[in-house]
Image (cartoon, rainbow, N blue to C red):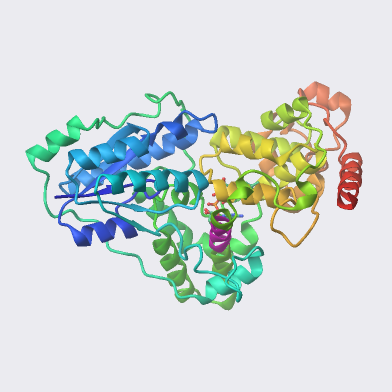
Amino acid sequence: NPILFWHRRDLRISDNIGLAAANQQSPKVIGVFCLDSNILESEDIAAVRVTYMIGCLQELQQNYLQSGSQLIILKGQPIKEIPKLATALNAKAVFWNLDVEPYARERDRHLTQTLKDQGIPIQTFWDQLLHYPGEIATGAKQPYTVYTPFWKNWISKPKTEPVDTFQNRETLTAQQQEAINQAGAIPLPTAKDLGFIWDKELMLAPGETAAQERLEEFCNEAIFNYREKRNFPAIDGTSRLSAALKFGAIGIRTVWDATINAIAGSSSDEAQENVKTWQQELAWREFYQHAMYHFPELAEGAYRHVFKSFPYDNNLEHFQAWCEGRTGYPIIDAAMRQLKSTGWMHNRCRMIVASFLTKDLIINPKMGEKYFTQNLYDWDLSANNGGWQWSASSGMDPKPLRIFNPASQAEKFDSNGEYIRKWVVELRSLPTKQLITGEISDSQREKLGYPLPIVQHKIQQRVFKERYNQQKVE
Ligand code: FAD
């Protein structure tokens, strides 16, 4: 009898811990992916993300076929569909890799119970992190709430090697094929079939081949200048692997291995330090996932007390202007337009626009977090929540208050205005200084069809601080 392997956010056959374990325990492994109606029918979904995911599934399906097995596609509620399939196939067991998100954990709890009731064994594994939650703890065996000590502990621990690529050893019987058809398997739909239309190019082509190629390309060159270049949104100085990491188109051990090889092959201490900076970003990803695992209430709202009932303005016109990239602040508008056009935004700009929404427009970060959820192709609950809580100063962060000045951020990180010119086309003809400072006269704005600033940074900064100090007292 086959083992059924349930793919979730591990859309690959290489370096997949749960799949490799199934492969070791049985010559016949059948894959399954369930298009989860709870996720696809929620309002927090982005066409660009579904398009990337379906692309990953296409390659995964090809890989299964090539090894004489199959990736079955189901649609509906996994807690119903997976047990139905496991029973129809008379599966020896169901295997899957674990996740940190509250929804996934709750779903898995239900499913585990159902399978147990039906007498079908399960095996689960940690795969998407180099260190699973609980493995990195303080001396008092508590989870970390501050990044730096977490990083020190995390980097000191040995990391595991990539595991073997899946290779099915026994083909399916006609009877099993029939059972699959009976259990509601469907052909893999396109994103369009599911009602999601994204007709622009994707930042990174979907699937594990493209992710591995991108990793190689990045680790051959850009990684050695990462520390400085990662801050400039006009430069392709970061890996752009975030969606591949979110959907598991690449294994984290493979990524880590590439950094070790980069360090071994680097020509100077300086080059090694750059690789280390990138490793620190991978650790941020794990820090936020551990945080979400241990403190699922983070997904609901502010972590710090002072922000739990903060008097935000939540002006809907301002929020709409921010979403549409027409705040009248060139760097903000450039970033928001990049997001809309590509489904991705440079990290520096994510920080700038999030600070602007929460500290200048004084809008609840939950609104921005949701908008990102509805537009990012690399959206990840833990990283997005962590990024928003950091920017809103509401999270696990020793620095209590941080307000970015859009003009000085643009001056530092887009000093020649290249990024702004790329995305705010109506301002292209202006001198760089005006793009950066945003000092554009009303008549110029009118002539170019560019909006007036919707708020004044200086005033808003004062208002925000006053409210913050007031809240601290209460
Ligand atoms: P690189 O710089 O090449 O970094 C490598 C990888 O490390 C990334 O792919 C990502 O997996 C991880 N990483 C890097 N920085 C962070 C970070 N600060 N926190 C957590 N992981 C990190 N990242 C997401 O993957 N999904 C999100 O939904 C998301 N939302 C964000 C929202 C806000 C407000 C902020 C400030 C940051 C957010 N980030 C998010 C983190 C970061 O912006 C992206 O991971 C990064 O821009 C992706 O580009 P890259 O792959 O080129 O990153």
Instruction: Indicate yes or no whether the magenta region holds residue 285.
Output: yes
Q: Is residue 216 left or right of residue 26?
A: right
Instruction: Indicate yes or no whether the magenta region holds residue 346.
Output: no
Q: Position of residue 242 (x, y in %)?
A: 50, 50
176 versus 138 height, above or below:
above
392 versus 178 height, above or below:
below
Q: Residue furthest left?
A: 174
Q: Is residue 183 left or right of residue 453?
A: left
> In the figure, residue 431 lies in which quadrant?
top right
Q: Is residue 3 left or right of residue 233?
A: left
Task: Mark yes or no: residue 30 visible.
Answer: yes
Q: Position of residue 312 (x, y in %)?
A: 80, 37
Task: Mark yes or no: residue 165 visible.
Answer: no
> In the figure, residue 125 lies in which quadrant?
bottom left
Looking at the image, which is closer to me, 471 or 217?
Answer: 471
Looking at the image, which is closer to me, 365 or 360?
Answer: 365
> In the figure, residue 237 lies in which quadrant?
bottom right
Q: Position of residue 374 (x, y in %)?
A: 56, 34
Q: How many marks?
A: 0
11 versus 15 height, above or below:
above
Q: Residue at x 70, y 39 (%)?
A: 420
Q: Residue furthest front?
A: 117
- Span of residues in magenta: 281-290
Q: Position of residue 126 (x, y in %)?
A: 40, 60
Name the dominant secondary structure of the magenta segment. Answer: helix
Looking at the image, which is closer to me, 445 or 158?
Answer: 158
